[in-house]
Image: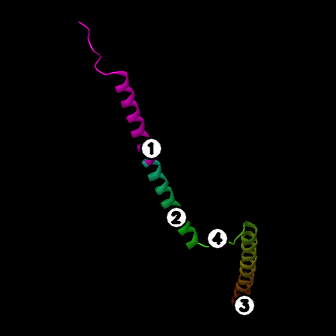
Amino acid sequence: MSQEPLITRSELRKRKEERQKEQTQIEKTAKKEYERKEKEIDNFYRKQTKKQPPLQKTRTEEKAKSQRISNTLTKWIVIVFCLLVAVLLMVFFW
C-alpha cells in the first residue's frame, strides 16, 4: 500500500509563488498608500509655511531693542522721581 503525497512539490511551488505574488501586491499597495499619505502631509505643511512669513528678527536685534526700551524707561522713572521729590519739597517748605 503506497500512499500518495497529499500535496506534490509542484503544487507547493505554485502555492509559494502565489503567496509571493500576493505579498508583493500587498507591499505595492501599501507603499502607494504610504507615499500618497506622505505627499498629502507634505502639501499640508507646505501650505502652512506659505501662510506664515519667515521670521525677520534676530536675537541681537531683539536684545538691542530691549536694552533701548529699558534705558528709556529707566530715564523716565528717574525724571518722575525727581519731579515727585520737587513737589514734596514744595509742599513741605512752602
Q: Badge 3 is on which residue? A: 90
For the magenta stretch, what is the residue range?
A: 1-28
Left or right for 85, reference 44: right
As measured in the structure, the alpha-carbon distance from the residue carrying label 2 to the one carrying label 4 is: 18 Å
As measured in the structure, the alpha-carbon distance from the residue carrying label 1 to the one carrying label 3 is: 91 Å
Q: Badge 4 is on which residue? A: 54
Q: Which mark is residue 43?
A: 2
**Label 4 secondary element:** loop
As measured in the structure, the alpha-carbon distance from the residue carrying label 1 to the one carrying label 4 is: 39 Å
Instruction: Answer with mark 2 or mark 1, whichever residue precedes in sequence.
Output: 1
Tell me if label 1 and label 3 are in contact, CB under 8 Å: no
Mark 4 Cα shell of 10 Å, populated few (<14), some (14-19), many (≥20): few
Q: Residue type at mark 3: give it.
A: Met
As measured in the structure, the alpha-carbon distance from the residue carrying label 4 to the one carrying label 3 is: 56 Å
Q: Residue type at mark 2: give it.
A: Asn
Q: Badge 1 is on which residue? A: 27
Q: Which sits in the foreground, 26 or 10?
A: 10
Quarter of the picture containing the N terminus is top left
Instruction: Answer with mark 1 or mark 4, whichever residue precedes in sequence.
Output: 1
